[in-house]
Amino acid sequence: MNVAVMGYGTIGSGVVEILRVNADIIAKRAGVPLKVTKVLDLRDFGDDPISSLIVHDYKEIADDPDIDIVVETMGGVEPAYTFVKAMLESGKHVTTSNKALVADKGAELIRIAREHEVNFLFEASVGGGIPIIRVLDKCLTGDVVEEITGIVNGTTNFMMTKMTDEGSEFDDVLKEAQSLGYAEKDPTADIEGHDACRKIAILTSLVSGAQVDYQDIPTEGISHISATDIKYAAAMGRKIKLLASSKVSGDTYYCRVAPYLLPPEHPLFNVEGVFNAVFVRGNMLGDSMYYGSGAGKLPTASAVVGDIVEMAKHVHMNVYLEWHEEKLTLADPKAQSFRNFVRTSADRSEIESIFSDLQFVDAGISGETGFVTAELTESEMDEKLGKLGDKVLSRIRLG
Amino acid sequence: MNVAVMGYGTIGSGVVEILRVNADIIAKRAGVPLKVTKVLDLRDFGDDPISSLIVHDYKEIADDPDIDIVVETMGGVEPAYTFVKAMLESGKHVTTSNKALVADKGAELIRIAREHEVNFLFEASVGGGIPIIRVLDKCLTGDVVEEITGIVNGTTNFMMTKMTDEGSEFDDVLKEAQSLGYAEKDPTADIEGHDACRKIAILTSLVSGAQVDYQDIPTEGISHISATDIKYAAAMGRKIKLLASSKVSGDTYYCRVAPYLLPPEHPLFNVEGVFNAVFVRGNMLGDSMYYGSGAGKLPTASAVVGDIVEMAKHVHMNVYLEWHEEKLTLADPKAQSFRNFVRTSADRSEIESIFSDLQFVDAGISGETGFVTAELTESEMDEKLGKLGDKVLSRIRLG
């Protein structure tokens, strides 16, 4: 069976490498040998053996009747969307690692695949090598999923781990992450939570069966987290982690991306560095967790190859995915309630005039006061923080 | 689509409960409503609503053309094997939670299912609600699996957790586990590692594609672990856990079930109580871990229902499973090497005359000496322990 790869960057080249190195075992599992016959890229690759397979026009793949499976590892919504749609309409199976494409166009591409009796899979779009998509779609199908909470961005988890272990400031850790290749030159999508937001939108769409628009999810990144916040976290015996989460509320979900202060007993407390993990609670299964490499060339490519094998085994059958185009209206995020940690320059009497049932936290920092609130809705919290005004130095939810 | 359940015990009744409570969402995911129409059990159930569905002869299910899917939750090899085989030969899909049946007859039943164009699935047979079978069979298919190490027996993990937390002796903790319903009246299968052994045989068969006979796997339980061993573990900053593990060696695997002393950085160190977890290393994916409820009525039944949904989606198609009847010859267990912890009544000079590169461990226990060996093959270790003879009080491998 012939495979084409669109986008010969980090992940695309990883897919080609895995199909070569593990060719024998993959052929046994797929029931048929898999061969990469075309690679779409704008560039040429000189002496690289891949250069003989390079094409510059996606139509050369769409129009090639010998290609059954297409891998999309270009990233971004366009032109990936146009290319992927053309492949599905040409009767080719497609797998993608592209979270932006899946979050934006997943439901539509699933429908188009179904109409053309092919498959559109996207295991690598969330959690890198962690098979969380297949777990939700193929395994926990007897359960109402009540909660999904994940560390789904390796860049920010690396940074929070470094800040926690070394007490460093955000900007210094960001520079280190960039020099190690863990953060991009423009790190906005990672550090402001946009990447995690698309991923939780995809996971929530899959368990609800409806379209969750990532634009509807309140998203807060980690760029405001300081070494002082970390000191308070340590004083509380907690760690700060950027979480993407969905919690069932009646027929819909509360969704949110934000940093949280986690206690040691939280299942994600020990997930360190660039690793990712997703906690899932089912109404029958109870608690479960899935942990692994959330990014990186080979782990992500491994997930793409898993999809290729799955499609090779279902070459004449659309595997039904319950994710439709009608929009899911999320629960009002202002009605969700949390305990909160707050740092303020206000004095204790002013704090106590606004918040009740609070607990002060002593981290040995002078000139400010840290405290933990009772459980409050986001609306109540907004109102109370409004009263403190610019005396609020920091606010982090407790997980 | 109609479902029959064979064996209305803990798990069978859980399956019926989940199909009722989560009926709507299951029907959406399966693409069709699922209805339990027959339940095989030796007993009658009086006023229980299930009593109208009870049949006492499995042929009433095998001969019922309206039943597409059969659940086997009876346990044991016979008569489950006879019944399951008859169902497959009658063109019915079968899912089972029965590890004894799968370890013994898995490859054959997979072949029979393929010959009759139906499916034989067994997600619930390992790890309860943890979807480890589907992860290995459907997700990590691009990888050579280099290692699987699991805590796959909740009873013994509960006991080891209690012994660690409370310093209690084995017999006291066993009594407590029995009174809580976590251990059976005859606890042999759990505490001697036979249950874990069948589970690692199943997982190794799945990743190798060949038949791993559980009888070939060296299996040591936890019944010899004492409160004194736990004190030494604490002195080393380690915990003792019963692990079932497979490690690649050339074209085959070292398999073993035994208690191990794990350091805090080990991914399974924090898996406590009745929870299960399986660590998997792929040659491309790297490290991953899957964690959840390894037993219990609803978690296990949730895995069975996941199989039912998968079979409902593949009612006209055999999903290829790479597990054949030819036997895998495991790597010689005597050639596997470990560091080992040993307690002995021998004196230091005698110990040092036998073992080199050793480290003594002080746990404040008088009348004996504890030490950790260098890495030694099992053969070398047998020979050296033979020299100490009956002065060996305890030996536990390091993980």
Image: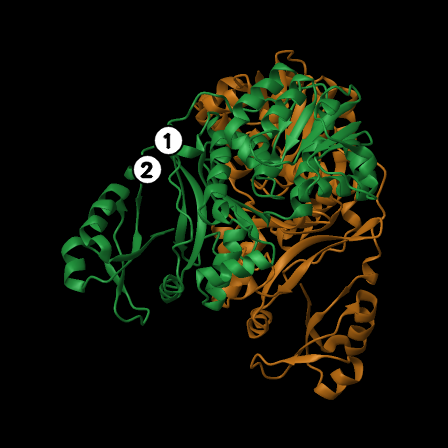
Chain colours: A green, B orange
| In the depicted structure, whether residue B90 falls above or below residue A354 | above
Q: CA distance from mark 2 to mark 1?
A: 8 Å
In x, y percent, where is residue B80?
68, 31
Residue at mark 2 shares a chain with residue at mark 1: yes
> Number of callouts in the render?
2
**What kind of residue is marked 1?**
Leu
Chain under disc 1:
A
Question: Residues at badges 2 and 1 in contact (C-beta under 8 Å)?
Answer: yes
* In the foreground, A134 or B153: A134
- Dividing the picture into quadrants, the one containing residue A83 is top right
Say which quadrant the C terminus of chain B sits in. Answer: bottom right
Left or right: residue B55 versus residue B84 is left
Residue at mark 1: A330
Q: Is residue A59 visible?
A: yes
Pick the residue in front: A245 or B76. Answer: A245
**Which x, y percent locates residue B82?**
73, 27
Residue B325 at x, y = what percent?
83, 35
Please identify the quadrant where the N terminus of chain B is shown: top right
Pinpoint the chain carrying mark 2: A
Q: Residues within 10 Å of mark 2 (few under 14, many from 20)?
A: some
Name the residue: 50% across, 47% down: A190
Q: Observer-nearest residue: A121 or A367? A: A367
State left or right for residue B315 relative to residue A354.
right
- Find numbered disc 1 in the image and state the secondary structure of the residue it sits on: loop
Question: Is residue A244 or residue B291 the one in the foreground?
Answer: A244
Q: Which numbered dot is residue A333?
A: 2
Res B326 quadrant in image: top right
Residue drawn 75% across the image and 79% down it: B357
